[in-house]
Image (cartoon, rainbow, N blue to C red):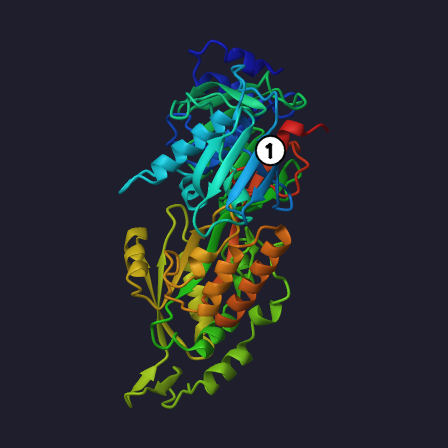
Amino acid sequence: MRFFIRKLLPLTLTLLLILPDIARATNMGDSLVIGIQSTKTTLIEPLDPVERDMMSIYDLVYESLIVIDDDYLPQPGLAESWEESGNGKTWTFHLRENIFFSDGTPMTAHDVVATAQYILDRANEEDSQTPGYYFNLKYFVSKISASGDHTVVVKTASGRNYYGLLYAMTFPVLPKDRVSSPNPPGTGAYMISTFEPANYIWLQQNPHWWQTKPQVQEMMVIMHDSPSAVIESYEYARVDTVFTRSIAAAQHKNGSTSLALDYRTNQLETVLINHKSFPLDSLAVRQAIRYLIDPDKIAKQVYMGMVERTDTPMIPGTWMYNDTLSDYFKTDIEAARALLEADGWADTNDDTILDKTGSDGKQKNLHLRIYVYEEPDNNVRVETANLIADMLGQVGISTKIEIMTFTDIQKKLKAASFDLAIASFAMDVCPDPGYLLMTGNTGNYGLYKSNDMTSLCKDLRTQLTQDGFKQSLWNIQARFAEDVPFICLFYRSGSVLTRQMYTTARDVRELELLRGIETFHP
């Protein structure tokens, strides 16, 4: 056990006093020093996380009924088995026995129900401004109850009696009398012994954990106020491991003293298309635009490779991803020219801009507005918009880029007052893109309308097995490729920079960046 941890026992010590000792601690051994960005977390509230890096810390302390494995498939967690009945309208989860919270209290089905009910009650409050992070549970669960101490019974919400429910059962389980209390005990491998907001968190092993004792006995999490401060701490060896989505982290990925674990975030970057806006109501124009945009070039020049390329809303490289559709998504300038020409577009006045005579007899240029909002820490989306404008200009599509605030672009999207918009979606843990694609759904900002697609999404929500669920997802992606509802660019990615490997997990993913440390033995 390292000396700097012992020095923290007097709780009056400040972070500045311990930094010199942290700087000398670079080997994992039985402890680890982690650097994260955190300025907003003032209470340990696992059901109401306000910062993504903190969720990777919570993941070590709190466990769920279901866990998602390296293949992105549901596996037993606190529930050792489950079955459905009534065509998926009822799901019964059987809990493991002899599971204890870190304070020694037994975990029972009543704790699961109380936690879920707290989530549902908040999510279903009318006009609530704080529905909670796990509010999507309300779309899957209409009623949850306990049948004895080790059985949980779930009645599904209307139209959600399907395999996707398992992904919704990944919320952290808390003691029934502590669901709204700060720093509640969990059943995970570690417990939070000390928390100083904006300074540090000290985690120790949970003496009551139900699995094999972890090699890493304790962790110190040092909080920083900016992405650059996190990187600086790593550069000066104040910490062993950092989480970062900063583009600047790319320079450390090939360092001789660092290991870099790339991870996929749930942030899907897209080019939204307004299907009610001329000329984007034409399938040929939408297909041409897709042929012209080169996501690989954007990834290399703008994002320095810190992305994971995807052609559809599904996660690439997993069982759910339809990898038979590559011909639809290749970059092909000549194919784009041919589509536009067949659709009646030509440069009739030699001004380098395509034009066409409309149904009203007036000549109209192929001109598009590109709306974009920027991130506070970098200008990657503006650079992306400029590249896309250049790509479209190759065949005579004129564009105008307008940079907006996030609030303003939200208003434009909700009013469907745009042509193209570069925007991202935080995809849910459940692989169900229906909210983006079904007619009239909240995420369908481009007003894409397809009875076939809506039927396919409804069919997905009837599938009770992984095989059926997969086939439905593949069918949805095939229709997506044909209709061009919008254009997927990539999932953003980040890096865990570390001086020692701490996991054998193949799929290190956002919100679970320390996944596998509890079972790692070098």
Specify whether residue 439 is in view: yes
Q: Outermost residue, front direction? A: 86
Q: Is residue 354 above or below residue 485?
A: below
- The residue wearing badge 1 is 77
At horizontal 71% and vertical 27% (from top left) the residue drawn is 521
| Secondary element type, mark 1 | loop
Answer left or right for 239 relative to 117.
right
Image quarter of the C terminus: top right
The answer to which quarter of the image holds residue 327 is bottom right
Q: Is residue 462 above or below residue 185?
A: below
Residue 142 in picture, x, y percent from top left:
42, 42
Specify whether residue 233 is in view: no
Residue 348 in picture, x, y percent from top left:
38, 90
The answer to which quarter of the image holds residue 372 is bottom left
Depth check: give the residue in front, 5 or 130: 130
Image quarter of the N terminus: top right
At horizontal 48% and vertical 47% (from top left) the residue drawn is 428
Amino acid type for the residue under numbered disc 1: Gly
Residue 339 in picture, x, y percent from top left:
49, 82
Q: Outermost residue, right direction? A: 522
Depth check: give the residue in front, 153 or 253: 153
Label tally: 1
The answer to which quarter of the image holds residue 300 is bottom right
Residue 139 in picture, x, y percent from top left:
42, 46
